[in-house]
Image: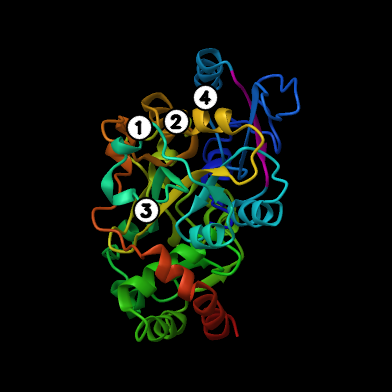
Amino acid sequence: MSNKSSIFRITALIAVGGLGVVALSACGASGDGGDDGGSGSKTVTLVSHDSFAYTKEVLKDFEKESGYKVRVLKDGDAGQAVNKAVLTKDNPQGDVFFGVDNTLLSRALDNGLFQSYEAEGADRVQARYRVDQGKHRVTPIDSGDICVNYDKAYFTEHKLAVPTSFDDLIKPAYKDLLVTENASTSSPGLGFLLGTAAKYGDDGWEGYWKKLKANGVKVVDGWEQAYNEEFSGSAGGKKAKGDRPLVVSYASSPPAEVIYADPKPRTAPTGVADGTCFRQVEYAGLLSNAKNTEGAKALIDFLIGKRFQEDMPLNMFVYPVVEGAKVPDAFTQYGPAAANPETLDPARIADNRDEWVKSWTSLVLK
């Protein structure tokens, strides 16, 4: 999710509310980190992307119960963090990595980033999110849907039906209305590309993009520009006088437009085209050559524990993956998970991702 990272999360929150509600440091630490994290250390280091967020009290509870102090190292967007973790796997920066998603999972596994650990409570993870069965190199932590969002006011004013599917986006009625992110530089952009590959297959996705390009799709580098500058429906886009009423973002974007608005609107100003979604899943793993393996195992157990699972949605705008974890009412009301998102087997992504991005770049940007 290149900037899933890009992700919505932090930048969106700031734009939506003016908020600074979630104030994250580029490289933050919980606990005093008073040792070097080596064997026998009581400090465990979690390496993640910049969008990792949590309620401090929740992590403090883990520290109190486990006896471990947690140091959090945020290392750029998701793609950057994964690549750096791979490059440093022989001498890792930490003990646990959180935030590799299904679009990049194969890169991490193929490069031996993780060692096997079956987390306590893994049997409570919903079966549809489990991968790597038998090897247990990663543990699913959260899921989210990349979807086209629409500006409700625009479609009402223009008496135009909102699009509901990939096919709708190539119809003349929606010409010059969609903005998306560069699939080679942005996680949601890549997710949208993968969604079309899943929908139309190897023989059809390029033809779809030719039609989308002919229908005036606009491509920008990243989510921040697309959502907070080009999209007419977001709080940031309104301020920037964005003129595109369709944008590739997240199913959880509409709830954020309500939760962090002041005053809060009665309904979300944006909606989701449910038939345009691609599901992302994020994983955590015990890093190969981790110095504090026991602390890392305890932390991974905690990440799929009910308390952290229920803490994630309003901090990272993702959904829990553990059975029985409660989802905030605002999510259910304003941004339910997609009913039938497109998905792809991580192995198929691994086999095709680079070639698809290369072909997409040649087809759409040149």
Is residue 285 rendered to the left or right of residue 122? right
> Which label sits on residue 249?
none
Q: CA distance from mark 3 to mark 1?
A: 15 Å
The reply to whether the magenta stretch includes residue 150 is no
Q: Give the structural element (helix, strand or loop) at label 4.
A: loop
Q: Which residues are magenta?
A: 68-75
Mark 3 Cα shell of 10 Å, populated few (<14), some (14-19), many (≥20)? some
CA separation, marks 4 and 2?
17 Å
Residue 295 pos. (x, y %):
57, 28
Disc 1 crowd, CA 10 A, few/some/many (<14, 14-19, 20+): some
Identify the residue at horizontal 61%, vertical 45% (top origin): 49
Give the residue drawn at x 53%, y 75%.
357
Q: Which of pointers 4 and 2 lies earlier in the amino acid sequence? A: 4
First in sequence: mark 3 or mark 2?
3
Tag 4: amino acid = Thr
Q: Secondary structure at mark 2?
A: helix
If you read the primary sequence from the N terminus, does the residue marked by circle 4 or circle 1 appear first?
Answer: 4
Q: Are circles 4 and 1 on residues that touch, CB within 8 Å? A: no
Label 4 or label 1, whichever lies nearer to me, is 1
Q: Which residue is mark 4?
A: 55
Could you tell whether 221 is left or right of 324 in the image?
Answer: right
User: Which picture quadrant has residue 28?
Assistant: top right
Q: Which residue is mark 2?
A: 301
Q: CA distance from mark 3 to mark 2?
A: 17 Å
Near-viewer residue (265 or 318): 318
Which residue lies under the disc numbered 1? 121
Report the amino acid beneath label 2.
Asp
Is residue 22 visible in this depiction of the protein?
Answer: yes
Q: Quadrant of residue 256?
A: top left
Q: Whole-percent x and y of residue 242?
A: 54, 59
> Seen from this angle, which residue lies furthest top?
64
Residue bearing mark 3:
131
